[in-house]
Image (spheres, rainbow, N blue to C red):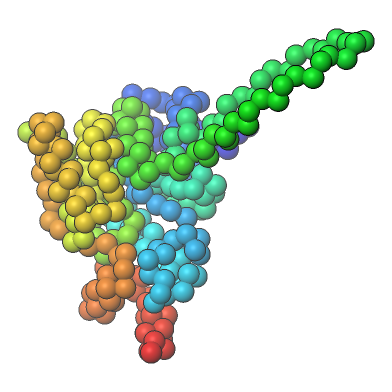
Amino acid sequence: MTAQNEETAQISSGGQSLPHATALPGNSPLLRPSIPSQDEHPSRRALLVMARQPIAGNAKTRLVPPLTSAAAASLYHCFLQDILATVRAAARDVPFTPVIAYTPAAAQDFFRRLAPDFWLINQQSPARATAPDPPAAGPPPAPNPRPAPAAPQPELQPEPPAQQPERLADRLQFVLSAALEQGFRQVAAINSDSPTLPSHLLRSAFHRLDDPRIDAVFGPCADGGYYLIGVKMPPGRLVTDVQMSTPTVLRDTLAIAAEEGIRVDLLPEWYDVDSAHDLDRLTAELASHPECAPAASGFLKSTWPSMSSSQP
């Protein structure tokens, strides 16, 4: 029995199911939680947390320096704990299905342990992750008693370029579309870099999507991007035609929405933690309100002050 089948068997009685489905198809990219939900009326909303496994050297690299690679990864681990707690709090008031959209593909077990009550989906499209099958082996050639004349040497052909990793925009398009294809009528995705994000903003996103006059919702970030995108249909150009990680992400997105006639609503602005300046802002906020992100607050109290004092 595969891991996915084991999970399905564990919650076959009384567990939460996706809309219009009592069992996921074998090729579904969504993986069930290992802890079943007691909700007898599953929501037709889904909230995806875009998350990366906190590995030193691959997580929050823009915080190095002032942090070390190991400290930056540990801090991001705390961010994940805090944002997942925020998602759980929001789901108590506005029912939705919590999902972690994770990367890299090998991180499934890590996130299963971190949040056994969340659904999981790999950010990478299965089509990108699957290599073509090798050609079928044929019968061995018949022996030739007479040596064949030497054939001219073919020109050397350049090797095909290595497949590039999917852009954030492509991964976002994939996970949002995949969730909608499973029957959810509202799907939102949030970053995992805003550990103090208030839960009421998540609730507000779904309330705004309830309005038939609204097609999409965005939560603006102070750096020009957005911490949340909520849609009722695959976002398409709203993400695929935008250069992510630039100061004009939201502005460019809104321009495309206007071109496409997509009606957008905006949540209040918040901030994510990508730079040393953002880290200072987070430290100041948590000094007054540690309850906003308890895991990050505890880490910063024990690590960040001593590291700050050691800076020249």
> Can residue 99 be seen here?
no
Q: Quadrant of the N terminus?
A: top right
The image quarter containing residue 189 is top left
What residue is drawn where x is 22% and y is 38%?
A: 238
Viewer-proximal residue among 117 and 68: 68
Q: Quadrant of the C terminus?
A: bottom left
In the shown orientation, is residue 248 left or right of residue 302?
A: left
Position of residue 66 measured from the top left corner of the image (x, y, whole percent): 39, 77
Viewer-proximal residue among 16 and 98: 98
The residue sitting at the left extreme is: 213
Position of residue 191 relative to residue 72, above or below, is above
Viewer-proximal residue among 241 and 49: 241
In the shown orientation, is residue 212 left or right of residue 271?
A: left
> Can residue 109 be seen here?
yes
The image quarter containing residue 270 is bottom left
The residue sitting at the right extreme is: 145
What residue is drawn where x is 23% and y is 30%?
A: 233
The image quarter containing residue 195 is bottom left
Viewer-proximal residue among 206 and 14: 206
Position of residue 294 relative to residue 116, above or below, is below
Q: How many marks?
A: 0
Position of residue 128 measured from the top left corner of the image (x, y, whole percent): 48, 34
Position of residue 116 measured from the top left corner of the image (x, y, whole percent): 46, 49
Position of residue 75 relative to residue 11, above or below, is below
What residue is drawn where x is 90% and y is 11%?
A: 146
What residue is drawn where x is 41% and y is 83%?
A: 307
Position of residue 100 measured from the top left corner of the image (x, y, whole percent): 39, 46
